[in-house]
């Protein structure tokens, strides 16, 4: 994207991202403030850049959860953009092939203006999509259809993208003799195994332990790997195809130079197959990619979150859009154990409106956004007993309010970085939530327990 903008607008662009040094950031900031550079291209925090005489804010891929910052201050760049445009008289453009349910609802009801792009970039044909029921397959990793299509694609000197939204080699390693699974001391989570470094790693706190090939409890070498990651996919795929492959995940992509090199090398056809997590679904443009394979489409679908269907549809649609972006027609193969699931079937039809109608009706029945507002009160402490007591007392004190309360309940990962975690979810109309926030602010000002930390997240993106 940066290259495309620089070709068109030359040196009139300021670029803001997390890899800039303090000096580089200050220089860009000054060039924006002085009016020297009139276009700002950046990540989430770029929304605060000091643009004068602001005319437009464009949020590309507006559905992305990364516009919401998880740490304090917990702002959503989309809502900041809306407020800034209202205050400064600018226009906001929200772009996405799979808009968030809330945004599309506001567009359908006339709050936003809806504009449709009827054709793909360059008038490319939409790819053919095939659903494969993995219950009927012998291979745990690759269906016969996917292997055959990879073979045909490589024979034509075209490229392949494979998606599996799971990092590392295996989700965990279990001892077959005593049943022990290595867990993180800091977090209540099994440690993933990364073969590239030969280490166990906690994907929450980052703790790493050297892998010895023996059970740390009984010393047995009879270990089994459970849950496949992209490292395992690469290893298994090499048994079938002797071609250059490269893999990428969110951690690797944080290294700007490394990710740029991967992008350039794959664009230059130095690699035939790109294997990655959901990072590869985000707007990458490779005209020679004619096949996309989704190894397991069910991972996000089964999360206990009312947005899991929406996130799955978005991911499948976005990654499907990587196939056939040039003058060659593309194909997508989606592997699943739930071929009759409506989300999977709607993804095959490439029909956002069909999916939206089902999803919005479900949201209305269960009073989920956009028909309500949600607020999460998160509690954490190293003292588990005190945490349970405080969260229970807090819940009792707010029960009198005219909102729906759920909890206190443990977070999906109960302990992270040695802190135990509980949540109270609050749901209600915008008016009721606004009134509740005033009440809550007063309660928090009165709260003085130093052992328990309370964090309020308004409009949480994830409910886990």
Image (cartoon, rainbow, N blue to C red):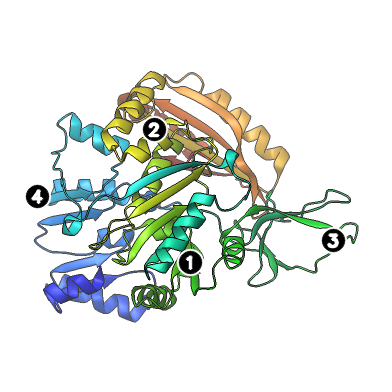
Kindly indicate the quadrant of the structure image that contains residue 115.
top left
> Of circles 2 and 3, which is in front?
3
> Of circles 2 and 4, which is in front?
4
Q: CA distance from mark 2 to mark 4?
A: 28 Å
Q: CA distance from mark 4 to mark 1?
A: 41 Å
Q: Give the crowd class for mark 3: few <14, some 14-19, many >=20 residues within 10 Å.
A: some
Dot 2 corresponds to which residue?
A: 437
Query: Toward the viewer: 98 or 334?
Result: 334
**What count of labels does the image hold?**
4
Element assignment for label 1: strand
Q: CA distance from mark 1 to mark 3?
A: 30 Å
Dot 3 corresponds to which residue?
A: 216
Q: Residue at x 31, y 36 (%)?
A: 101
> Of circles 4 and 1, which is in front?
1
Residue 248 image label: 1
Q: Earlier in the sequence, mark 3 or mark 4?
A: 4
Element assignment for label 2: helix
Above or below, 49 relative to 316: below
Q: Whole-percent x and y of residue 449?
A: 61, 42
Relative horizontal placement of residue 118, taking residue 361 as reference (left or right): left
Residue 172 image label: none
């Amino acid at each position: 994207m940066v290259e495309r903008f620089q070709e068109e607008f030359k040196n009139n662009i300021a670029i803001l991202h997390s890899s800039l040094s303090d000096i580089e950031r200050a220089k860009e900031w000054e060039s924006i403030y002085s009016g020297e550079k009139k276009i700002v291209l950046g990540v989430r925090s770029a929304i605060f850049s000091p643009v004068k005489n602001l005319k437009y804010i464009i949020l590309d891929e507006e559905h992305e959860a990364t516009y919401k910052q998880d740490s304090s201050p917990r702002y959503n760049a989309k809502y900041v953009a809306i407020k800034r445009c209202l205050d400064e008289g600018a226009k906001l453009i929200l772009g996405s092939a799979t808009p968030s349910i809330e945004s599309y609802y506001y567009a359908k009801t006339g709050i936003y203006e809806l504009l449709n792009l009827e054709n793909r970039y360059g008038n490319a044909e939409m790819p053919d999509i095939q659903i494969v029921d993995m219950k009927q397959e012998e291979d745990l990793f690759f269906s016969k259809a996917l292997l055959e299509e990879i073979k045909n694609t490589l024979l034509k000197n075209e490229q392949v993208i494979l998606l599996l939204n799971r990092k590392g080699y295996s989700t965990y390693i279990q001892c077959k003799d005593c049943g022990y699974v290595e867990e993180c001391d800091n977090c209540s989570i099994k440690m993933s195994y990364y073969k590239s470094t030969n280490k166990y790693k906690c994907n929450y706190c980052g703790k790493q332990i050297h892998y010895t090939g023996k059970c740390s409890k009984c010393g047995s070498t009879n270990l089994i790997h459970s849950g496949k990651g992209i490292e395992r996919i690469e290893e298994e795929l090499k048994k079938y195809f002797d071609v250059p492959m490269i893999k990428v995940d969110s951690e690797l992509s944080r290294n700007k130079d490394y990710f740029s090199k991967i992008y350039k090398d794959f664009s230059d056809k130095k690699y035939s197959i790109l294997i990655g997590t959901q990072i590869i679904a985000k707007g990458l443009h490779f005209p020679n990619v004619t096949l996309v394979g989704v190894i397991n489409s069910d991972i996000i679908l089964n999360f206990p979150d009312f947005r899991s269907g929406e996130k799955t549809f978005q991911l499948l649609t976005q990654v499907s859009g990587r196939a056939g972006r040039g003058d060659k027609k593309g194909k997508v193969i989606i592997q699943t154990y739930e071929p009759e699931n409506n989300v999977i079937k709607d993804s095959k039809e490439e029909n956002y409106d069909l999916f939206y109608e089902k999803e919005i009706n479900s949201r209305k029945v269960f009073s989920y956004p956009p028909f309500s507002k949600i607020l999460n009160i998160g509690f954490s402490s190293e003292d588990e007993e005190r945490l349970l007591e405080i969260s229970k007392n807090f819940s009792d004190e707010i029960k009198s309010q005219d909102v729906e309360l759920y909890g206190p309940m443990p977070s999906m990962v109960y302990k992270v970085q040695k802190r135990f975690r509980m949540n109270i979810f609050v749901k209600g109309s915008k008016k009721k939530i606004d009134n509740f926030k005033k009440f809550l602010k007063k309660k928090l000002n009165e709260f003085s327990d130093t052992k328990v930390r309370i964090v309020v997240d308004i409009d949480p993106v994830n409910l886990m």
